[in-house]
Amino acid sequence: MRVRCVGGILRDEAGRLLMVRRRNPPGEGLWSIPGGRVEPGEDDPAAVARELKEETGLDVVAGTKIGTVERPGPGGVVYEVHDYAATVADGTGGTLRAGDDASDVRWIPPDELRELPVTPGLLDALTLWGLL
């Protein structure tokens, strides 16, 4: 079974990436791009906005699709993750806080990201996409 998921890639003015530490499997305790499953009837941009609000507290707008990765899950599930560039929404923005299935959220410089425990394949994908 394939499960469509999205992620939102945000950078701040200092070039740091917004990352979450996953609270639940898969990837519990590992750092990753914030995101999650697309709900029935939801398009990718709406899913990016909802998932990032839930995980980071920020109101975001999805932009250009950056890339797609596939990750194995339990019971033969394949997570098909479509990652989009995203920006904090003008005006509202929200307040950065870990929520939903994130145990921590923070802006991380790319060089420090290489020193943290991250989800499998994350550094390879970010490097391939020119983000590291």
Image (tube, rainbow, N blue to C red):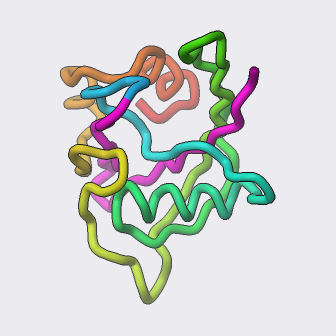
The front one of 79 and 1 is 1
Across and down, in percent, residue 63 comes to 65, 59
Residue that protrudes farthest toward the bottom in the picture = 91
Residue found 25% across the figure and 28% down from its top = 29
Q: Is residue 45 left or right of residue 122?
A: right
Number of marks in the rendered image: 0
Q: Is residue 130 left or right of residue 21?
A: right
Residue that protrudes farthest toward the front in the picture = 75
Q: Is 14 included in the stretch rendered in magenta?
A: yes
Residue found 30% across the figure and 48% down from its top = 16
Across and down, in percent, residue 15 comes to 33, 50
Across and down, in percent, residue 4 comes to 71, 37
Q: Is residue 111 left or right of residue 33?
A: left
Residue that protrudes farthest toward the top in the picture = 76
The front one of 4 and 7 is 4
In the displayed structure, 71 sits above or below 5; it is: above
Q: Is residue 18 left or right of residue 41?
A: left
Residue found 54% across the figure and 43% down from its top = 36
Quadrant where the N terminus sits is: top right
The quadrant in which residue 88 appears is bottom left
In the displayed structure, 73 sits above or below 42; it is: above
Quadrant where the C terminus sits is: top left
Across and down, in percent, residue 49 comes to 56, 64
First to last magenta residue range: 1-24
The quadrant in which residue 122 appears is top left
Q: Is 56 included in the stretch rendered in magenta?
A: no
The front one of 52 and 101 is 101
In the displayed structure, 93 sits above or below 2; it is: below
Residue found 33% across the figure and 43% down from its top = 19
